[in-house]
Amino acid sequence: MAKPYLIYKTPNGFYYAEILLPDGTRANKKSTGCKDRAAAERKVMEWIVSGNIPERTNGKKKSNTNVDKINFFNCVRNYDFQPEDVLKIGQILQERKLIKSFVMENTPQSKAIEEFLEEFWDFDKSPYVREKKLRGQSIHRDYCVALMTRLKTYWYPLLGGKSVGEITRDDICQIFNHESVSELAPKTINSIVSSITIPLKWAFFHGLTNNNCYDGIIKCSSKSKKRKVLTLEQAMEVFCAEWENDSAKLANMLAFYTGMRQGEIAALRLEDIGADRIYIRHSWSHFEGLKETKTNECREIKIPQQLREMLLTQANLNPHNEGIEGFVFYGLKPSQPTDPKNWLKYLQRALAAIGYSNPKEICFHAWRHLWCSRVSDLIQDKRVVMAGSGHKTEFMLDHYAEHIETERALEKLEKAQEKIFLPILEKSEEITDV
């Protein structure tokens, strides 16, 4: 019977051995530390029986490498693995927490993270957007553009060059230690985190990664810095001041009186002005153009005749001959409104003109905050206020709001608006006429 090893003598007089493995290969040459052949063969048989091969010639220190492991490693090097075999090995090592992640070649997991993310947030190509729409859920182009911008600014420098399957929760958490991020508002930081966790969560549930990169990540407190809002007295002063742009002044007045969002005012067309009210049917986005409102629902808000006449006068100045589909606050090109950013610019200039200490701290959206605050002072029923503001943030309020008589709610709002806001518009009109 053939011996399970080969043994030979070197010029220095020591015997070396090569152990034969079951697959026909040989282990690396090892010195027995013996100059007597019989002693050397006994030593080699001890190795084979015990399964331990010494690391040093004196045999005092033994390695953890045994014959079975050597055989295993040789099999790994030479075996013709199928993809499912490789996947199973990787899963076992991951389950034993010996590796954090693994990526197989030529699989969806090996896709470059940049390529995956750019497709994921591409509004026209994204499978995520397609799924949202199929389920009747709202998602807008400008939202996708905003999150893609977050990715390029904050995540590409951290994750660039990796594949989808390589990304781990540790990679995501490192954003909280990023110096440029620590100075941002909590809401902005959460948006940055969402820009990567939303796609990786989708990837996990669609088999594009084995790593759960979204659970257990604690986001920042969502409490935002309190927005600065003008008082009614300051609003009176600013609307009685001389404005550089009458159209911008009217847009600000409309936001002040109705609490409409900036995009809703930009989307306002001649056909949306009724006999005693405005029909808020659309919103305007730089990326999507005319789209549904934020809540995907239309609403109405009553306005006084003075404000209605001013809006009709503004609409009639539209030079594009688009009829009732023409924008009230028209732009330089047909089928486009003016850039709403100009409204804030002229508002801040008017604030500076009246000596307001820090005009930059007031944004256009502050009119909406002012409207909601002052109307809520007079109307305790939040359902009525929400019918005018279009807020849909509390489930139970949404549920009860469906059963409110719309006209009755609008009448309550009309009285509140006339009491709070109309005196300021009338005072402004008197000064303008002088």
Image (tube, grey):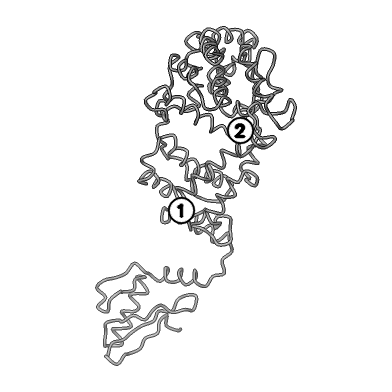
Q: Residue furthest front?
A: 434
Q: Please identify the quadrant where the C terminus is shown.
A: top right
Estimate the spatial distance between the alpha carbons at disc 2 and disc 1, rounded to whole Å.
39 Å
Toward the bottom, the furthest residue is 11
Identity of the residue drawn at 49% across and 49% down? 152
> Which of the pair 420/292 is nearer the observer?
420
Of marks 2 and 1, which one's residue comes earlier in the chain?
Answer: 1
Q: Secondary structure at mark 2?
A: loop
Amino acid type of the residue tagged 1 in the rendering: Leu
Q: Position of residue 99 (x, y in %)?
A: 43, 56
Residue 49 image point, x, y percent: 36, 72
Would you say the residues marked 2 and 1 are in contact, meaning their CB atoms lie under 8 Å apart?
A: no
Where disc 1 sits, the SS reads helix
Residue that badge 1 annotates:
159
Residue at mark 2: 338
Q: Looking at this view, is 281 or 16 the one in front?
A: 281
- Relative to 108, say whether 182 is above or below: above
Depth order, front residue of 189/278: 278
**Identity of the residue drawn at 49% across and 31% down:** 345
Between disc 2 and disc 1, the foreground one is: 2
Q: Is residue 73 above or below residue 308?
A: below
